[in-house]
Image (cartoon, coloured by chain):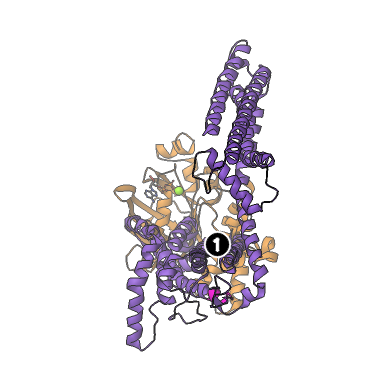
Chain colours: A orange, B purple
């Protein structure tokens, strides 16, 4: 099943020695906010265990597209999504899809760190609790511990798991939000400019983290920083005014862009 | 009248001072306003403040103390006051004052009194003359002095700003002093009450029947001032009111802020707030004429004995009245919970009701607690509905179907009617007022502490 979809993605030049499995496929996706068409005819394959970066000037529809993968657009009044997105071969835009289940498979990290007004422990335990992932307290603690360890936060917070999540620094809060997302063991993690509210050191820490965890997950990240896209992603998609202009291996996009608009953007002429 | 004219003159002088200060600043600055240390207007205000503030302060103090000073001068000049009691003297002074201003006098006017009245009049005129001269001299002198100091290097802005600062401090302390004054007056009257009735009898007594005999020879009750029935009555009605208002208010706030479509919310919220604008007397009618009979009939059908004036009727209607307090404030608080928290929960796969229960409400809790405590103090202080629907009988009961009375209702009934002002009956009102004050104060204190605790936990 996944082999066929991978073959269908003709634009990406796959290196022959690795099999690049496709996790999700967007076909002719379009999004309307009321009458405005914010996104048109987007076709994109998201590869498993890779980081896909969505770049483009602000207002071009990156966040809008990202929110299609976990149906967060459902929570916006007057927002309508057309086309189709397959996740492991299952259509997720169909009306009968259980979004609660979908969002357990597709986690999300937001632009501004948004820890809940609860303790660090309860923040991470929130997802496992609502999805009933742990059958005992010990199991829950195990999930929380391993999520915090995976995000590198464990050593910093192990002595104060019951302090409020909001008492952490901005970078720690964002890592807490990542830990909260991975605690439900999602397959895909969506990140919407996760570093834009952070200082360079915290940003570097998060980028490192993204690179570490991608072997377990599939990551789609929106970023306005081209350096970040170049550093963390394997695939890049460039959006402009609601259109997906160019997509491909990050290396190719940054060294040999085919479209004029992509070139202008990465050399800093538009944006 | 004369004082207000004088005040107006001083204000005009201050305005003139402003203009002259400004023009002098401009005149002394060689090369225009740029060479001034402060803006020209600041020099104007500087002169105006020196012109107006001391003179106005003098007028204010003078009008406070003029009455007593003139009166004591008058009394000192009266020929035969040694034999008079304080009350008689007061009456006499009052008569003289009335005579001087041409009002009706309580007894016949003898020439001695006429002379005293004339003297009173001339004393007053003299006093006013002195005030006028002094204050105008202060205004003109202060203004001239200040104007003399105006020069381009003079730091007028700093001084004006300091004056504004002082003015703001004074304004902000007025409210505090008023509160202190209210508490003190309440305390003094209450202490007089506790001289007559022991404190413990009042606080722990189980019987309330404040009718005392008017005259010594009258037969009648001696009065019992045990306030416990009033406290329990207040508590019972407040409890019933909150049992109605808290859930309905909170649930409607949740519906309005989280579920209702925008247009519906826009229409319903103002409608709910209209409830808060209905006069409480109207609620009282509603309670007495509609709700109380309804409960009574319902009780009859169920085989219960419901009094025609019941705590239940009053409490339920009061609850309806305070619904908007809870709902409107809670709705604002819930709306203030950042959308990013909801997004975070939805992003993890939480359903709408999980998000509301586990994320939004805990985050909004301080504000919700605050709104409910506000509603409680509203309920404790409410009088009209209880008078009309719950009766005046001070029953010591926890049965909501009987009639009860509350602290505020009793304060009103104690002070209505002819009673000497130093009888225990009237003084009891102040003791009750003091208790009310203490209760509301501690409620506010608790509310603040609760809110703070949650703040620490959730911010
Ligand atoms: N909730 C919304 N309601 C209406 N229009 C929206 C909404 N969110 C985004 N848009 C519009 O959709 C377009 C794409 O927005 P977005 O996806 O947020 O851009 P990006 O993330 O690339 O900066 C913009 O023109 C924006 O104005
Ligand atoms: Mg965006």
- Given residues B441 and B197, the one toward you in this image is B197
Asked if residue A38 shows in the view, the reply is yes
* Span shown in magenta: B224-232
In x, y percent, where is residue A169? 63, 54
Asked if residue A100 shows in the view, the reply is no
Above or below, B350 against B304 in this view is: above
Above or below, B455 against A227 in this view is: below
Above or below, B222 against B71 in this view is: below
Kindly state the secondary structure of the residue where label 1 is placed: helix
For residue B227: magenta?
Answer: yes
In x, y percent, where is residue A38? 35, 47
- Given residues A248 and A119, the one toward you in this image is A119
Subunit ID for the residue under disc 1: B
Question: In the image, is A111 to the left or to the right of B188?
Answer: left
- Given residues A212 and B123, the one toward you in this image is B123
Quarter of the image containing the C terminus of chain B? Answer: bottom right
Above or below, A172 against B401 in this view is: above
Which residue sits at x=35%, y=67%? B285
Which residue sits at x=36%, y=89%? B303
In the picture as drawn, the residue positioned furthest to the front comes out as B111
In the picture as drawn, the residue positioned furthest to the left comes out as A35
Q: Is mark 1 within 8 Å of ligand 1?
A: no
Question: In the image, is B48 to the left or to the right of A189?
Answer: right
In x, y percent, where is residue B436? 57, 65
In the picture as drawn, the residue positioned furthest to the top comes out as B30
In the picture, residue A246 is in which quadrant? Answer: top left
Count residues near mark 1 (Cα–Cα under 10 Å), then give few for <14, some for 14-19, many for 20+: many
Q: Which residue is mark 1?
A: B366
- Given residues A241 and B413, the one toward you in this image is B413
For residue A247: magenta?
Answer: no
């Amino acid at each position: 099943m996944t082999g066929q979809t991978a073959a269908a993605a003709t634009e990406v030049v796959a290196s022959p020695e690795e099999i690049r499995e496709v996790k999700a496929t967007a076909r002719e996706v379009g999004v309307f906010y009321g009458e405005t068409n914010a996104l048109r005819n987007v076709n994109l394959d998201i590869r498993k265990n890779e980081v896909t970066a969505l770049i483009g000037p602000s207002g071009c529809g990156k966040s809008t597209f990202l929110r299609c993968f976990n149906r967060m657009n459902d929570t916006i009044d007057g927002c309508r999504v057309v086309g189709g997105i397959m996740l492991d071969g299952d259509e997720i835009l169909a009306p009968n899809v259980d979004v609660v289940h979908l969002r357990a498979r597709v986690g999300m990290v937001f632009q501004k760190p948004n820890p809940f007004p609860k303790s660090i422990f309860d923040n991470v335990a929130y997802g496992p609790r609502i999805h009933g992932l742990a059958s005992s307290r010990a199991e829950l603690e195990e999930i929380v511990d391993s999520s915090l360890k995976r995000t590198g936060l464990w050593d910093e917070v192990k002595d104060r798991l019951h302090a409020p999540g909001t008492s952490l620094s901005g970078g720690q809060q964002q890592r807490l939000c990542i830990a909260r997302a991975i605690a439900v063991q999602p397959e895909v993690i969506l990140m919407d400019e996760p570093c834009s509210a952070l200082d360079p050191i915290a940003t570097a820490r998060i980028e490192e983290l993204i690179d570490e965890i991608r072997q377990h997950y599939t990551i789609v990240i929106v970023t306005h920083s081209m350096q970040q896209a170049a550093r963390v992603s394997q695939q890049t998609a460039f959006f402009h005014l609601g259109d997906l202009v160019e997509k491909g291996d990050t290396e190719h996009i940054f060294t040999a862009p085919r479209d004029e608009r992509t070139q202008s953007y990465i050399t800093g002429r538009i944006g | 009248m004369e004082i207000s004219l004088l005040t107006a003159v001083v204000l005009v002088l201050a305005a003139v001072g402003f203009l002259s200060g400004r023009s002098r600043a401009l005149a002394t600055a060689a090369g225009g306003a740029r060479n001034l240390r402060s803006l020209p207007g600041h020099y104007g205000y500087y002169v105006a403040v020196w012109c107006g503030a001391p003179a106005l302060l003098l007028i204010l103090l003078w009008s406070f103390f003029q009455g007593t000073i003139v009166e004591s001068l008058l009394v000192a000049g009266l020929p035969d006051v040694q034999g008079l009691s304080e009350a008689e003297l007061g009456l006499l002074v009052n008569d003289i004052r009335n005579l001087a201003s041409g009002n009706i006098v309580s007894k016949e006017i003898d020439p001695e009194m006429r002379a005293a009245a004339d003297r009173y009049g001339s004393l007053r005129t003299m006093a006013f003359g002195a005030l006028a001269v002094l204050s105008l001299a202060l205004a003109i002198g202060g203004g001239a002095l200040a104007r003399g100091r105006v020069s381009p290097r003079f730091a007028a802005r700093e001084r004006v700003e300091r004056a504004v600062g002082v003015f703001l401090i004074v304004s902000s302390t007025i409210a505090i002093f008023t509160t202190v004054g209210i508490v003190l007056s309440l305390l003094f009257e209450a202490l007089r009450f506790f001289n007559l009735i022991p404190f413990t009898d009042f606080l722990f007594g189980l019987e309330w029947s404040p009718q005392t005999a008017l005259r010594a020879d009258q037969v009648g009750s001696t009065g019992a001032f045990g306030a416990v029935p009033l406290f329990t009555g207040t508590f019972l009605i407040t409890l019933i009111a909150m049992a109605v208002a808290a859930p309905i208010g909170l649930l409607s706030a949740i519906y309005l802020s989280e579920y209702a479509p925008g247009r519906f919310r826009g229409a319903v919220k103002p409608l709910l707030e209209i409830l808060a604008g209905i006069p409480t007397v109207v609620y009282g009618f509603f309670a007495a004429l509609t709700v109380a009979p309804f409960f009574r009939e319902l009780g009859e059908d169920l085989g219960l004995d419901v009094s025609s004036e019941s705590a239940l009727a009053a409490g339920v209607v009061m609850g309806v009245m305070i619904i908007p307090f809870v709902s409107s404030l809670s709705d604002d608080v819930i709306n203030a919970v950042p959308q990013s928290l909801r997004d975070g929960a939805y992003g993890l796969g939480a359903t709408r009701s999980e998000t509301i229960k586990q994320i939004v409400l805990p985050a909004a809790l301080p504000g919700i607690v605050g709104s409910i405590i506000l509603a409680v103090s509203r309920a404790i202080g409410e009088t009209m509905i209880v008078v009309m629907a719950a009766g005046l009988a001070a029953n010591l009961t926890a049965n909501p179907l009987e009639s009860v009375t509350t602290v505020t209702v009793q304060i009103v009934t104690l002070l209505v009617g002819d009673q000497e002002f130093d009888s225990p009956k009237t003084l009891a009102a102040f003791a009750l007022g003091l208790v009310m004050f203490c209760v509301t104060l501690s409620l506010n204190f608790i509310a603040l502490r609760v809110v703070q605790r949650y703040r620490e936990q959730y911010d």
